[in-house]
Image (cartoon, grey):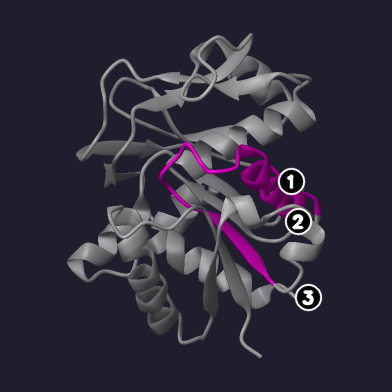
């Protein structure tokens, strides 16, 4: 049986990322010479992640937040993190990876996003100074990071579709808990995060949407890495 990836989010044909993610996975699988499958899993359908996601070898928390069920998305993230399954989040998925990590590891029990709870007391996700809706931006990868190894170079240019990002006021708190910020824009603003291999075998989140490379017919390096990690995971 081919390993399966749970695409956790609320599918809409109007969302560019949702339309292109299957193509990105197809191209990545072809480039890696392996076969993986994927299934869309709505956030509202996740009540018991261990039960509802048991057959999946990896989780990709996809763009387009707010989700129908933030609790469902966070439960999927926590389950994948705790069971050491490959876990990737792009755009809104990245934001929710940080929220779950902040609640579980950084002592920020009320960690939240201003997108849905603007009056929250611990908003680690807040509006960007400049919207990145349908924008591209050059990125710099941290030396020694997984992203630097995956891309095989120090810089890249990626596409975005977001209005929210990391609240810099919580950066040090998250880093102290073990989160590594590993991609930055020209103004040194955080654009990706990951956990070291000793904390998790594959935990990466990006504010950018690497899947958009498939719009150009390219296999995204990060999606290829996810496919490799998925095929290496044993249920």
In-image side of 120 versus 141 (left or right): right
Residue 173's x, y, as percent? 67, 17
Q: CB under 8 Å between callouts 3 and 1?
A: no
Q: CB under 8 Å between callouts 2 and 3?
A: no
Above or below 42: residue 235: below
Q: Which residue is mark 2?
A: 49
Q: How far apart are the alpha carbons under marks 1 and 2? A: 9 Å
Q: CB under 8 Å between callouts 1 and 2?
A: yes
Q: Which residues are magenta?
A: 56-82
Q: Which residue is mark 1?
A: 78
Q: Which residue is mark 3?
A: 235
Quadrant position of the C terminus in the picture = bottom right
Residue 18's x, y, as percent? 36, 59
Residue under the point 46% across and 57% down: 150
Q: Is residue 147 a member of the stretch shown in magenta? A: no
Quadrant position of the N terminus in the picture = bottom right
In-image side of 128 versus 226 (left or right): left
Which corner quadrant of the image does residue 48 belong to?
A: bottom right
Residue 2's x, y, as percent? 61, 86
* Label 2 element class: helix
Residue under the point 74% across and 27% down: 103
Which-is-in-front pick, marks 1 and 2? Answer: 2
Nearest to N terminus: mark 3 or mark 1: 1
């Amino acid at each position: 049986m081919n390993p399966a990836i749970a695409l956790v989010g609320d599918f809409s044909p109007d969302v560019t990322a949702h339309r292109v993610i299957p193509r990105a996975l197809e191209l990545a699988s072809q480039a890696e010479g392996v076969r993986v499958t994927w299934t869309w899993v709505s956030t509202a359908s996740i009540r018991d992640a261990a039960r509802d996601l048991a057959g999946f070898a990896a989780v990709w928390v996809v763009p387009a937040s707010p989700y129908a069920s933030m609790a469902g998305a966070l439960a999927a993230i926590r389950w994948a993190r705790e069971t050491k399954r490959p876990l990737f989040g792009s755009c809104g998925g990245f934001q929710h990876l940080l929220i779950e990590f902040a609640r579980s590891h950084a002592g920020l029990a009320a960690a939240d996003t201003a997108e849905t709870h603007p009056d929250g007391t611990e908003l680690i996700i807040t509006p960007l100074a400049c919207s990145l809706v349908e924008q591209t931006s050059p990125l710099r990868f941290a030396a020694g990071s997984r992203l630097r190894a995956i891309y095989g170079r120090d810089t890249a240019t990626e596409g975005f579709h977001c209005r929210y990002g990391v609240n810099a006021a919580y950066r040090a708190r998250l880093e102290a808990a073990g989160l590594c910020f590993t991609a930055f824009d020209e103004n040194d603003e955080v654009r990706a995060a990951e956990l070291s291999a000793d904390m998790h075998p594959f935990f990466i989140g990006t504010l950018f949407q690497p899947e958009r490379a498939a719009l150009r017919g390219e296999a995204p390096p990060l999606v290829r890495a996810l496919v490799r990690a998925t095929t290496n995971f044993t249920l």
